[in-house]
Image: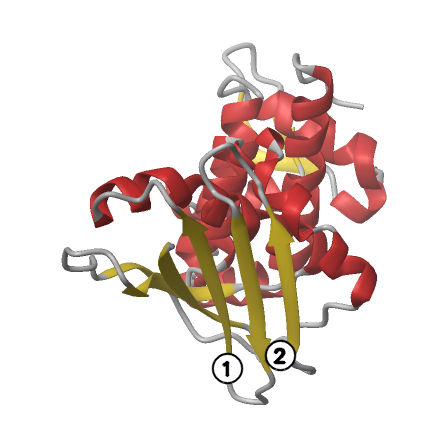
Amino acid sequence: MEYIRYDIVTTPIEHSFYKEIQKISSKISKVIIEGKESNVEGVINIFFYSEEFYNIYEAEQDTKTYVTNLLNALIIEHDICTKSYYVSGHNINCLASGSIEIINKIKKVAKLNEQDLEKLKQYMIDEKYSNRYFNIYRYAFNTEDIISKYMILYNILLEICNDKQRCVDDFITAAIGKDEAEYKQSPRKLKKGDYIYETKFTKLRNEIGHARENTTIDKTTEEMELNIDKLAKLVLKAIKSKEQDGNFVPS
């Protein structure tokens, strides 16, 4: 039986684990997932087995969606980040491809218990983890530069809100309240002279996107770093809301 193997470099793994999954599709008869304990960086190996892998290109095409679904689910459901993943081996008569994705340093420790392992098959086949916003979220969350990470996350909200800043701030204030969101008057005015109000999350985004007095790139970056985890949670909430309801409504 032919196989293709992926190595996924992740968050440090607290305990080694092994899971064998039978038949996730008519073509793939078995999947083996194993994680290796490490306090530096973890490695998760995924083996896909099939009697219908005729070349490596076809094998990658048949398995890549399952891998990316799993990676999306691990960060969304378990806060496990991936630094890179790549085809590391196979027994098919063709060369394997190189690295697919290389990201940044990871500090958190990955934890998967027995109940979590039982969910791995569902993660791979569940179409909701193919949501393009989850792909962007995972990429943003693993981006090392704090400004890039922040702007990517904010732009997910902006896209979900059809490029309407007011919608973004309505969603944020509804989710965490005006006080925590620090919903305040901005330096910008409408044509009729009224000031535009904005949350602190929008303020930081606008300090990068527009020149503003009494701001510095260092101060903005420092504030972004202090608020990045809160923003990430808000973005994930918005993605799940849109994925569940179809038409996103701030609430």
Query: 185 left or right of 223?
Result: right
Classify residue 93 as left or right of residue 154.
left
Q: Amino acid at mark 1?
A: Glu
Please determine whether, in this image, residue 204 is positioned above or below residue 241.
below
Along the line of sight, the residue nearer the viewer: 15 or 121: 121
Rendered image: mark on residue 125: none
Label 2 element class:
loop
Left or right, residue 246 beside residue 2:
right
Residue identifier under label 1: 41
In which quadrant of the rendered view does residue 234 lie?
Answer: top right
Query: Residue 250's x, y, as percent?
Result: 74, 22
Residue drawn at x 45%, y 36% as measured from the top left: 27
Q: Who is closer to the viewer here, 15 or 164? A: 15
Crowd band around label 1 with a 10 angstrom C-alpha radius: few (<14), some (14–19), many (20+): many
Give the mark, 2 or 1, whose residue is nearer the N terminus: 2
- Residue found at x 65% / y 64%: 19
Residue 13 - label: 2
Q: Quadrant of the C terminus?
A: top right
Amino acid tagged 2 = Ile
Frontmost residue, 103 versus 26: 26
Point 62% across, 34% down: residue: 126
Residue 80 image offset from top left, x and y in percent = 61, 64
Q: How is the image coloured?
A: secondary structure
